[in-house]
Amino acid sequence: MILNLLAIGDVVGEPGLAFLEANLRQVQKQHNVHFTVVNGENASGVGILPRQAKAIYAAGANVVTLGNHTWNRIQIKDLLDEVPWLLRPANYTNRVPGRGLGVYEGPQGLRIAVMNLIGRCEMDPNSDNPFTVANRLLRDVDAEVKVVDFHAEATSEKGAMGYYLDGRVQAVWGTHTHVPTADGRVLPKGTGFLTDLGMTGPADSVLGMRSNQAINRFLGGLPMRFEPAEGPCKLEGAVFAIDTHTGRCQSVTRVDIGEDHHRQA
């Protein structure tokens, strides 16, 4: 079968969460989606609260992934151990709660493995090497479909991960930068790849945050806590069409929906 897997970019703040809740089911129907992974690490602006993780799951996500702000809302730590659908980066130390890899049941009994990794370039230097961790974890995964959410800053690190895992997983996508890239493609050995999905949150903003706060920072003003912007929102991501018979991704289709519906998938 052709498995349509939807990956949604970082949910930013309560506005992004509300927009996801209002639109995810429609996007899934439009693209005949069988399985959905949503990155939720910015649902509280910086980090995610348990109620927000549960809201994303209730909105239609099969798996919720996180990233470098996992511990900014420490309240999430217990939920990471309690539910299988919430993942934090697998290359965090095993001394912290949660898991970074899960295997889930898809249509027709398919086993779908989702791995969450975090990059090290301009990111968390205390994390383990994401390449060696991915290699180690994949040796023991029993699943027909394997996909990776690589939460990383550097385009080069994300691209290298895509080629490193090419032919061993069906899809690799990047999260974290909140800016969608136009390089979706199928790599030579059959892995679907996209450098960054983008975000789900306020459109008139700087990476989902209030633009005046970003301007203040770059003008050298006093530090302040960034707050999610208000106004119209957008939902960004991609659909990976995976041939479960051949194990190859057939296509990568970007999803980009604005609140005013001027931009369609």
Image (tube, rainbow, N blue to C red):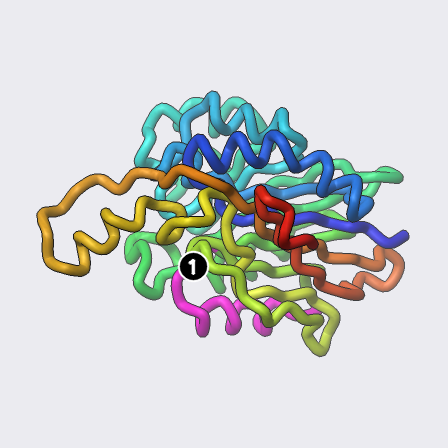
Mark 1 Cα within 10 Å, few/some/many (few <14, many 20+)? many
The residue closer to the viewer here, 94 or 45, is 45
* Residue shown at 30% from the left, 63% from the top: 122
The percent coordinates of residue 43 (x first, y second) are 44, 35
SS at mark 1 in the image: loop
In this rendering, position of residue 73 left or right of residue 53: left
Q: Quadrant of residue 13?
A: top left
Picture layout, residue 130 above or below residue 261: below
The percent coordinates of residue 191 (x first, y second) are 69, 67
The percent coordinates of residue 121 (x first, y second) are 34, 65
Q: Is residue 115 magenta?
A: no
Q: How many marks?
A: 1
The residue closer to the viewer here, 249 or 112, is 249
Residue 95 visible, this orientation: no
* Residue shown at 48% from the left, 43% from the top: 201
In this rendering, position of residue 245 left or right of residue 62: right
Q: Is residue 157 magenta?
A: yes
* Residue shown at 49% from the left, 37% from the top: 16
* Residue shown at 84% from the left, 55% from the top: 244
Q: Amino acid at mark 1?
A: Ala
Picture layout, residue 51 above or below residue 201: above
Residue 56 visible, this orientation: yes
Q: Quadrant of residue 107?
A: top right
Q: Quadrant of the C terminus?
A: bottom right
Which portion, as a residue range, is magenta? 151-167
Picture layout, residue 88 above or below residue 134: above
The percent coordinates of residue 47 (x first, y second) are 37, 36
Kindly identify which residue carries mark 1: 152
